[in-house]
């Protein structure tokens, strides 16, 4: 069989639930904008179908979807260069998800660590959607024949599962139809941790607002949260080895490195030896300089929700020009009669 050649294409998405925060920006959105100019088609999604795996207030979900779209654009994602979509407006995602649910195996799903983390001790009360959502994520990627998926470390397992599902589909039907997408994990802050507990990921679901920097926070709030961030009593080291066992210190240094577009070693070469009383004001100044313009632009965009809705509708039309033929061919391969 001749190996298929796939057009390089990027796909990724974020759930529109809760407030966008620094972890979303450094781990995903800023990277989305950077990938627009790397010679690949880029498609970025508000994955609202994933959001409803746990109950969402309808009004909040609609507002969060628009806020996420505003965050993408304010952080540099250009709706003319990239396709911006709301997942539920492109029905091929859900249709292919059923196919991928039939290809994937129960054992594969049971190994997904994110389900165990989110369901906790009440797995029997979790929604079926929460259990099988990796099949929907696979469909999200494969319905575009995406070849590259920028994700954080915590989502790498799901992209690897997507590769397994694509490979099984291809094997079962004797085709080379779906690509095996590669996870793209790069940068010094692909996993930003809580400002209150360096062992936990920064999360919109954390009950403490002080644990995260929201993209809509004003300059004073950003500075205050960094000033109160949990740290230890030792000075910053000059080498990365000196951060071992110092989760909070490593997190703040990683954030500084990411915001200043430097490596960890370059950053420690600059700030090594500083006490946190000296380092935190530098970090606060940098964070405010980077994030305040994004916050201002998000507010401007959200003042005109009809324009955001127009952008998402236009993106959905562009997306369906890609997803329609791919889903149609997948159905033909399976043996479904198409009119």
Image (cartoon, grey):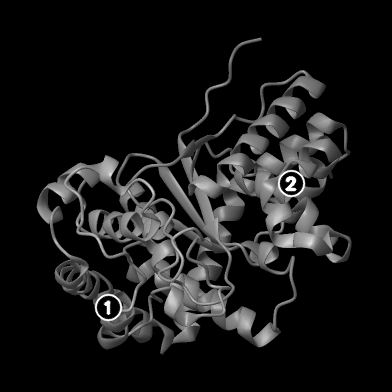
Question: Where is residue 108 drawn, in percent x and y?
Answer: 77, 37
Q: Residue at x 68, y 56 (%)?
A: 117
Q: Quadrant of residue 47?
A: bottom right
Q: How far apart are marks 2 and 1 (CA)?
A: 42 Å
Q: What element carries label 2?
A: helix
Q: Which residue is drawn at 45% across and 74% down?
A: 211
Q: Where is residue 261 in the image (x, y as percent from the top left)?
A: 21, 52
Residue closest to the far front: 233
Whether residue 105 is visible here, answered yes or no, is no
Q: Mark 2 points at which residue?
A: 135
Residue at disc 1, secondary structure? helix
Residue 154 appears in the figure? yes
In-image side of 78 versus 19 (left or right):
left
* Residue sitting at the far top: 1
**x and y percent of residue 255 in the render?**
30, 59
Camera-side residue: 257 or 307? 257
């Amino acid at each position: 069989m001749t190996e298929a050649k796939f057009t390089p294409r990027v796909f990724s998405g974020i759930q529109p639930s809760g407030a966008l925060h620094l972890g979303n920006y450094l781990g995903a959105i800023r990277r989305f904008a950077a990938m627009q100019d790397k010679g690949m088609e880029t498609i970025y999604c508000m994955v609202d179908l994933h959001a409803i795996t746990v109950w969402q207030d309808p009004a909040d979900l609609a507002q969060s979807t628009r806020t996420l779209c505003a965050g993408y654009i304010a952080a540099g994602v250009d709706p003319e260069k990239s396709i911006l979509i709301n997942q539920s407006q492109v029905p091929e995602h859900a249709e292919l998800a059923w196919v991928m649910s039939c290809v994937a195996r129960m054992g594969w799903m049971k190994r997904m660590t994110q389900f165990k983390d989110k369901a906790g001790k009440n797995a029997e009360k979790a929604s079926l959607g929460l259990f099988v959502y990796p099949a929907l994520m696979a469909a999200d990627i494969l319905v575009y024949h995406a070849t590259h998926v920028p994700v954080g470390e915590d989502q790498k397992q799901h992209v690897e599962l997507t590769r397994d599902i694509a490979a099984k589909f291809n094997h079962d039907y004797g085709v080379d139809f779906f690509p095996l997408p590669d996870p793209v994990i790069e940068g010094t802050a692909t996993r930003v941790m809580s400002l209150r507990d360096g062992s936990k990921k920064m999360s919109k679901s954390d009950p403490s607002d002080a644990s995260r920097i929201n993209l809509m926070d004003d300059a004073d709030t950003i500075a205050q949260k960094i000033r109160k961030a949990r740290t230890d009593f030792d000075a910053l080291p000059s080498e990365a080895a000196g951060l071992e066992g110092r989760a909070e210190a490593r997190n703040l240094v990683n954030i500084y490195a990411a915001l200043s577009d430097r490596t960890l070693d370059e950053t420690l070469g600059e700030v090594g030896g500083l006490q946190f009383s000296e380092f935190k004001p530098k970090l606060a100044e940098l964070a405010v300089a980077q994030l305040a313009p994004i916050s201002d632009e998000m507010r401007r965009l959200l003042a005109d929700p009809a324009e955001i809705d127009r952008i998402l509708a236009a993106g959905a039309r562009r997306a369906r020009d890609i997803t329609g033929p791919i889903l149609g061919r997948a159905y033909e391969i399976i043996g479904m009669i198409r009119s």
